[in-house]
Image: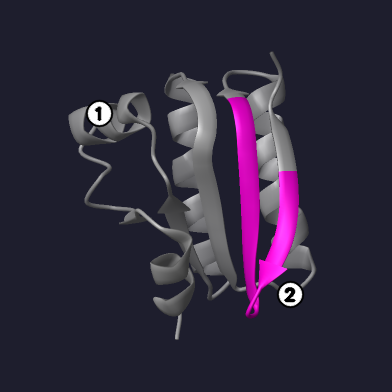
Amino acid sequence: MSMKVATRQVDGVTILDLSGRITLGEGSVTLRDAVHDSLAKGSKHIVLNLADISYIDSSGIGELVSAYTSVKNAGGELKLLNLTRKVHDLLQITKLYTVFDVKDDEASAISSFK
C-alpha cells in the first residue's frame, strides 16, 4: 500500500493528511514532495496528520526528521498530529518524541501556531 497525501488549509495552517506507509522509496519521497510543495507555496505552519499511517520504517523516520529540518530552516514550524500507538512508540524509542511538537487533536495543533 503506497502513501497518500491530502492537503488542506485551516486558519492559515497547512494540514497534510497522510495515509498508508512511510517507507523507503515511494512513501518517503511522497512525504518529502508534499512538505517541499507546501514550503514552496509559502506555508510556514505545517501539521502532519499521521492518524492513518499504518507503518513507518527507519527511512520514514529519517524523512520526518528531514521534513522537520526543512521547515525549520525555512523559518516555519512542523507539528505532528494523531500519532498511532506504533508511531508513538517508535518516536519514544528513537528519542524523537522530544524533538517533535506532538498534538493529539487538530484544534490544539492549529491554535499552537498562534
| Residue displayed at 45% across by 86% down | 114
Quadrant the N terminus occupies: top right
- Number of the front mark, 1 or 2: 1
| Gap in angstroms between the C-alphas marked 1 and 2 | 32 Å
Label 2's element? loop
Query: The residue under label 2 is which amino acid type?
Result: Gly
Q: Earlier in the sequence, mark 1 or mark 2?
A: 2
Instruction: Residue 30: give x, y in percent of width and height.
Output: 72, 35
Q: Which residue is more in the foreground, 80 or 76? A: 80
* C-beta proximity under 8 Å, tags 1 and 2: no
Q: Which residue is mark 2?
A: 42
| Residue displayed at 62% across by 59% down | 15
Relative to residue 39, is residue 62 depicted above or below?
above
| Residue displayed at 39% across by 69% down | 108
Relative to residue 103, is residue 31 depicted above or below?
above
- Dot label at residue 89: 1
Label 1's element? helix
Q: Quadrant of residue 44?
A: bottom right
Query: The residue under label 1 is which amino acid type?
Result: Asp
Instruction: Residue 37: give x, y in percent of width and height.
Output: 77, 56
Q: Is 90 placed left or right of 6 in the picture?
A: left
Q: Is 13 placed left or right of 98 in the picture?
A: right
- The reply to whether the magenta stretch includes residue 15 is yes
| Residue displayed at 62% across by 39% down | 18
Highlighted magenta segment, given as a residue range: 6-20
